[in-house]
Image (cartoon, grey):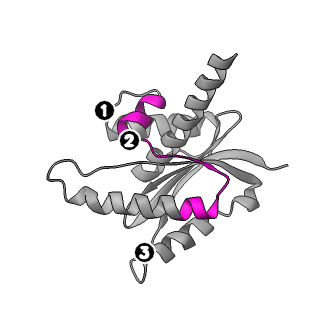
Amino acid sequence: MSRAVILGLDPQRPGIGFGVIDAQTGTALLAGWRAITQEGWYEHAVIAALAATDESRHGWHIAGLVIERVGGGKGVQSMLRVSDAAGVVAGCAVCRWPDAALWRPTPGEWKKSAGLKGNANKDAVAALGRALLADAGEPADDLRQDAYDALCMARASYNDAARAASTEE
């Protein structure tokens, strides 16, 4: 029987941060970053990066996907590329894992659900990511910010599911 996990993805144009949380226990399992080649079609590079997840090698079943929904704010051109990348990654991920539930939270939504302030800065997110990995006995230092963001997004999804289950009881 495979382990159900939640996969958080934080896409940027040069790569994708990823974080994996056990869907039953909320334990951090893995976090990291995969480079995406800038040659050829971005979609093809994303598909290759997602295939490198190799969830079957770990005995995982991707039960949930979390991919940040970013917007450009007034006059913020740089966020348009990130928003475009997030949409492409979401589409490719849903095609790869069609049975996984997809959540596209804003930064404020996932930060609050992860237990942070909605306007938490990068240092606060990285500290939470390090704590999640340390609690699981995993190496927690020297990761890119995108990896901590992705891990915290996956944890936010777990927290929301746990809260929903406790209100049903």
Q: Amino acid at mark 1?
A: Asn
Q: Secondary structure at mark 2?
A: loop
What distance separates the C-alpha of mark 2 from that of mark 1? 11 Å
Marker disc for residue 106 = 2
The residue that disc 1 covers is 119
The residue that disc 3 covers is 42
What distance separates the C-alpha of mark 2 from that of mark 3? 23 Å
Write the start and end of the magenta stretch as one range: 92-113
Of the two numbered discs 3 and 1 on the same chain, state the one appearing first in sequence. Answer: 3
Q: Amino acid at mark 3?
A: Tyr
Residue 35 located within the stretch drawn in magenta: no
Q: Most extreme residue toward the left, as rendered?
A: 75
Marker disc for residue 95 = none
Q: Residues within 10 Å of mark 1 (few under 14, many from 20)?
A: few
Please name whichever residue, 8 or 164, is drawn nearer the observer in this view of the structure.
Answer: 164
What distance separates the C-alpha of mark 3 from that of mark 1? 30 Å
Q: Residues within 10 Å of mark 2 (few under 14, many from 20)?
A: some
Residue at x-position 44% and y-position 36%: 110
Q: Contact (CB < 8 A) between labels 3 and 1? A: no
Q: Position of residue 144 (x, y in %)?
A: 42, 53
Up/down of 64 relative to 83, above or below: above
Q: Amino acid at mark 2?
A: Thr
